[in-house]
Image (tube, helix red, strand yellow):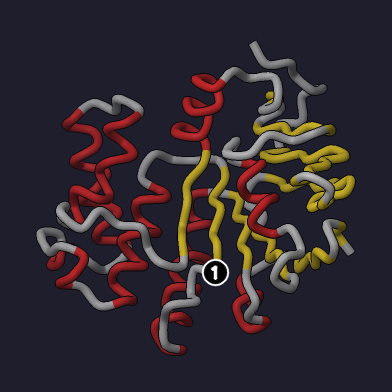
Amino acid sequence: MASLKENHPEHVLEISSACKSFGQLGVLKGVNLIIKKGERIALMGPSGSGKSTLLNCISGVENLDSGDIFLNNSSIRELNRSGVEALRRESIGYIFQSFHLLPTLTAFENIELPAQLIDMPKDERIEKVRKILKLVGLSSRSQHKPDELSGGERQRVAIARALIHNPHLVLADEPTGSLDSKSGDDVLSLLEELSIEQGVALLMVTHDRTSTRICNRVISIQDGCLV
């Protein structure tokens, strides 16, 4: 059982003195960050500054050397591997620059998958997929596979998939990096709208200053430190 912090119901994520090294290379150096319910934060920094490592530690893909990360006041560091995987499936949604959709599944099936992994009842998940397809404007494209969709449509599917299981936190890694400016702007507006509607916290890694328009805060990371 993971230890609990003093209960802060508005704190979705709390990072405390997080440190991570690979060999002699210090990548995260005492990172502290609190993200509250519904808050949207942009994380900016040059390549190699620690952005991807921080996302990997939040999701439990990488383990911290010291410090701790609390998701909904529960320590990720003290969970065993199966506990981390369960927490990740239930509480975190992901949006990637390269979409990461399964090519053999339709848009509907790609969105449905996270709900299946947490054993959401079939009738409930089908209704939720239909609803979120409508929200992202893809009801008429539900039976299309990724290679039959435009880049903007694929990213809309990825957003829907990230939100289908009602996560507390969405991690977005360059979500508009593969899109043209019009599609990217549409995707950002949709992500902001759905975040507000569902009260989901968002941590978005981006190199694009214009993408930060949907965020409440912009944080820079350099040489493993938030500045």
Quick check: 128 left or right of 29? Answer: left
Residue 35 drawn at (x, y percent): 73, 48
- Which residue is more in the foreground, 192 or 118? 118
Number of disc labels: 1
**Which kind of residue does numbered mark 1 sit on?**
Glu
For label 1, the SS is loop
Looking at the image, the residue that sits furthest to the bottom is: 181
Where residue 208 sits, quadrant-wise, is: bottom right
Q: Residue at x 66, y 31 (%)?
A: 72
Quick check: 114 left or right of 188? Answer: left
Where residue 99 sits, quadrant-wise, is: bottom left
Looking at the image, the residue that sits furthest to the front is: 23
Quick check: 51 left or right of 177? Answer: right
Residue 195 drawn at (x, y percent): 52, 57
- Which residue is more in the foreground, 163 or 27? 27
Q: Residue at x 41, y 81 (%)?
A: 179
Query: With respect to residue 206, does 166 lie above or below?
Result: above
Query: With respect to residue 178, does 219 lie above or below?
Result: above
Q: State which quarter of the image contains the N terminus.
A: top right
Q: Residue at x 80, y 67 (%)?
A: 220
Looking at the image, the residue that sits furthest to the left is: 143
Within 10 Å of disc 1 (Cα), the crowding (few <14, some 14-19, many 20+) is: some
Residue 218 drawn at (x, y percent): 76, 68
Residue 166 drawn at (x, y percent): 44, 40
Q: Residue at x 63, y 83 (%)?
A: 210
- Which residue is more in the foreground, 114 or 99? 99
Quick check: 220 left or right of 137? Answer: right
Q: State which quarter of the image contains the C terminus.
A: bottom right
Query: With respect to residue 90, does 171 lie above or below?
Result: below
- Which residue is more in the foreground, 24 or 73? 24
Q: Which residue is mark 1?
A: 174
